[in-house]
Image (tube, rainbow, N blue to C red):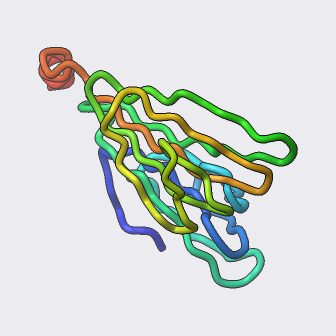
């Protein structure tokens, strides 16, 4: 069983090993390798491994205060270059999955995590490179306060 994180959103990504199936009374979600799966943190989730042990990475956030996303960057054929902008108010995190993706000329190893603070980060991916882009964008706090008042 998963821990109860009522009021939070979860984005679970299997980063190594086999996949798993997540089940709750009202749904079933497949979580294969490198495929972000988003669900309510308050769901009574149980998991079943589909192909042996695994490692997963969870982004958990309060949707009243911020928005979060996880995107996989994966190169199968040709090298690619991307300019990555950090959120105006938030956090950008890159997590290595395979190969040695370059961030501003610095390699990111498998399972390495980098917090990107400058707004002109350049991501370079060669064939076989993969990483997660984890993004949190903070809401305007006055909007969050109005949302909280409206819910009471």
> Looking at the rendering, in which quadrant would you find the C terminus?
top left
Q: Position of residue 141 (x, y in %)?
A: 14, 22
Q: Is residue 145 left or right of residue 58?
A: left
> For the point 72% across and 73% down, which residue is it?
18
> For the point 55% across and 65% down, which residue is it?
109
State the image quarter where residue 66 is shown. top left
Q: How many marks?
A: 0
Q: Position of residue 7 (x, y in %)?
A: 30, 44
State the image quarter where residue 88 is shown. top left
Q: Is residue 52 left or right of residue 3?
A: right
Q: Is residue 112 above or below residue 55?
A: above
The answer to which of 105 and 148 lies nearer the viewer is: 105
Q: Residue at the far right: name it.
A: 77
Q: Position of residue 26 (x, y in %)?
A: 60, 50
Q: Residue at the far bottom: name it.
A: 52
> For the point 29% across and 32% down, which residue is it?
90
> For the point 71% across and 62% down, which residue is it?
33
Q: Position of residue 32 (x, y in %)?
A: 72, 60
The answer to which of 135 and 104 lies nearer the viewer is: 104
The answer to which of 49 and 90 lies nearer the viewer is: 90
């Amino acid at each position: 069983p998963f821990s109860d994180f009522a009021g939070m959103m979860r984005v679970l990504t299997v980063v190594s090993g086999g996949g798993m199936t997540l089940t709750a009374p009202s749904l079933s979600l497949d979580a294969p390798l490198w495929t972000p799966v988003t669900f309510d943190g308050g769901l009574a989730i149980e998991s079943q491994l589909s192909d042996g042990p695994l490692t997963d990475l969870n982004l958990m956030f309060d949707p009243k205060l911020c928005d979060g996303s996880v995107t996989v960057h994966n190169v199968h054929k040709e090298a690619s270059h991307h300019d990555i902008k950090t959120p105006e108010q938030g956090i950008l995190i890159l997590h290595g999955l395979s190969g040695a993706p370059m961030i501003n000329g610095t390699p990111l190893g498998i399972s390495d995590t980098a917090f990107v603070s400058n707004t002109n980060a350049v991501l370079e991916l060669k064939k076989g490179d993969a990483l997660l882009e984890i993004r949190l964008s903070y809401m305007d706090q006055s909007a969050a306060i109005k949302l909280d008042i409206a819910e009471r």
